[in-house]
Amino acid sequence: MINKVVVKKKDGALLKGTTGDFLPSRESFHVHMLGSSDTRKVLTDDLKAVFFVKRLEGNKEMHDHIKDNPPRPRKTIGKFVTVIFRDGEIIEGYSHSMHLDRIGFFMSPVEIMGNNERIFVVLSFVETILIDGQNVDLYDSKSVKRTCEKCKKTMENGWSYCPFDGTALK
């Protein structure tokens, strides 16, 4: 599947284009650059986040619309997540599966009318994560300690059901 992406690098650079080989478990993927035939290999650990978008051109009028109108929240499952990056940018949304022992995690943005469909947050550039208003210690191995008895996958505390297979957690 081809996805439209806006890639934010840790150094502030932006790449806009499409990708067909992004996987959250891989160390790299390729971006076919907007407006050219150039394809760039991107190392995931060099990134701040990957924004999967509706339009590559963005929508500057949407920023004014959001200022004047309260956001329409998504109807989604998961926990409310606030991510504060090392450069001070803050994004909010929902995540139904967050594993702090991986390179990153997906979240759905709060604003349904915005351009972002989903966001892959790269953990190496995150300063703070709040889940349902509570701070998550990114460097404490105790934060990642629940294991599903059925699928044997590990997740952070606070989940009632395994996000992979739906098993009730004890």
Image (cartoon, grey):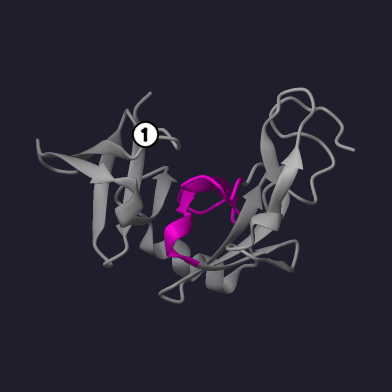
Q: Quadrant of the N terminus?
A: top left
Image height check: is 125 above or below 41? Answer: below
Left or right: residue 42 compared with residue 35: right
The spot of residue 165 in percent (x, y) is: 73, 25
Left or right: where does residue 20 sit relative to residue 160? Answer: left
Mark 1 surroundings: few (<14), some (14-19) or many (≥20) residues within 10 A: many
Q: Residue at x 69, y 56 (%)?
A: 143
Q: Give x and y (percent) for residue 122.
A: 44, 53
Question: The magenta stretch spans which residues?
Answer: 99-126
Q: 45 or 146, which lies in front?
A: 146
Residue at the front extreme, as displayed: 141
Residue 151's place in the image compared with 39, above or below, is above
Residue 77 seen from this side? no
Q: Examine the rendered structure and indicate whether residue 126 appears above or below residue 55.
A: below
Mark 1: which amino acid? Phe
What residue is shown at x 71% (from left), y 24% (from top)? 151
Whether residue 156 is visible here, answered yes or no, is yes
In this view, the residue farthest toward the bottom is: 88
| Helix, strand or loop under label 1 | loop
What residue is disc 1 on? 22
Give residue 78's position: percent from left, percent from top: 72, 45
Left or right of 13, for residue 169: right
Say which residue appears at 67% left-offset and 48% top-offset: 74
